[in-house]
Image (spheres, grey):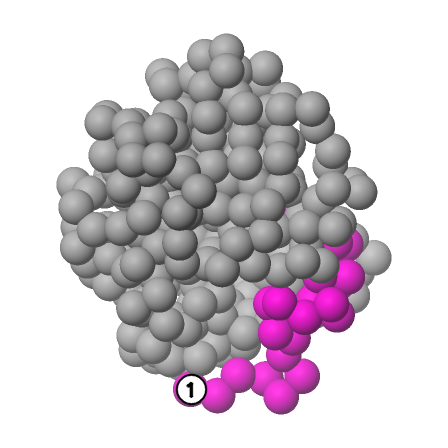
Amino acid sequence: MIADEDALGWESTAAADAYRGRDMRLAEALIFPAVLERLAGSSGPGRLALDIGCGTGAVAALLAGTGAWTVQGLDPSADMLDIARADRPHPRVSYRLFDGRGLDWLADASVDAAVCCLVYCTDPDDDRLAGLTAEIRRVLRPGAPYVLADLNPAATGVAFSTLRNGEPDTVYGDGDTVATRLRLRDGSTMTSTTYYRSLDRYRSLLTGAGFPSPDVDLPTLPADGSANGAPAETGTAPYMILTTHA
C-alpha cells in the first residue's frame, strides 16, 4: 500500500513542528491512564523508567509527575527532543537522543519499567524493532513491566475523533505502508507514514525477544448518549495496549 504523497517523515523537523500541536485527547483518555495503572505496582522513589520513542515528552512528563519515577525519555529525532525539553522539562526526566536500536549505556537488569507508545508503527524495519525489543528485555529487571501501546491493527480505516490510520475498506498486510492522518489542536491535520503490523507480528516481536506473550487491552470510550451519534472510539478501540514482563 502506498502512503499519501504529502506524508511527513517522523524524524523530520516539519513532523516535529506539526506533532507539537497534535490533538492528544484520545491518547490522554485511553493510553495514559493504562500506562500509569500497569506501572503502578513497580513504582517507587528513585525507580527508573524508560519512555522509548518519547517524542515531545508527554508520557515521560506524566510518569515523572507522579513522583514515583525517574525517567529517561529516548528518541531518534533531535527535533522532537528539543520540543520535549522546551515544553515538558522536569527535574526527574532526562531526554536523550538514541539510534532506535541500542541501549548500550544501560547495564543488564538495571531498569524498573519501560514504556513504548506509538513507536513500532512508525518503523518499517522488523529487524531493527527486534533488536530494540531484545535490548529492552536485557535492561529490565526480572519481573519489570514493559507496556507497548500502538495503533490497533483491527481499526485501520476507521475515522476516529483525532486520527484515521489507513483508508476505509482497505485490507493491509504486514509491512504495508499506511498513511495516518492526525488531527491538530487548531483543527487542521497532518499526514504521517506508518507501517501495518498484525497483532500476531507484535506478539512475535515480544516473544522473540524473550518476553512472555502479552496481555492485550483494547480500550474504548463510554458512549455519552449524544443525539448526534456516538464517535467511533466508543465502539472500536483506536489503540491497543500490550503488557508483558521481563
Residue at the image position 57 percent from the left and 41 percent from the top: 73
| Image quadrant where one finds the N terminus | bottom left
Label 1 packing within 10 angstroms: few (<14), some (14-19), many (20+): some
Query: Seen from this angle, which residue lies furthest right?
Result: 186
Residue 56: percent from the left, percent from the top? 67, 48
User: Is residue 215 shown above or below 4?
Assistant: above
Instruction: Please report the residue visible at 47 percent of the width from the left and 37 percent of the height from the top.
Output: 50
Q: In which quarter of the image is residue 141?
A: top left
**Apparent side of residue 147 relative to residue 210 in the rendered image (left or right):** right
Q: Nearer the viewer, residue 87 or 107?
A: 107
Q: How many marks?
A: 1
Q: In this view, does 153 lie above or below 86?
A: below
Report the residue that reaches farthest toward the top: 45
Q: What element carries label 1?
A: loop
Q: Nearer the viewer, residue 33 or 101?
A: 101
* Residue in the foreground of this view, choosing between 223 and 169: 169
Task: Report the residue at 35% width, 29% height from top.
Answer: 110
In the image, residue 152 lies in the stretch drawn in magenta: no
Residue found 48% across the figure and 65% down from its top = 122
Q: In the picture provided, is 153 more to the left or to the right than 72? A: left
Q: Which amino acid does label 1 sit on?
A: Met
Q: Is residue 23 magenta?
A: yes
| Residue sitting nearer the eye, 29 or 224 | 29
Give the labeled residue for mark 1. 1
Residue 128 percent across, percent down from the top left: 35, 65
> Could one spot residue 92 in this view of the protein?
yes
Left or right of 191, for residue 239: left
On-image quarter of the C terminus: top left
Q: In this view, does 182 lie to the left or right of 234?
A: right
Classify 166 as above or below 227: below
Q: What stretch is highlighted in magenta?
A: 1-28
Q: Percent position (x, y) of residue 29?
A: 57, 37
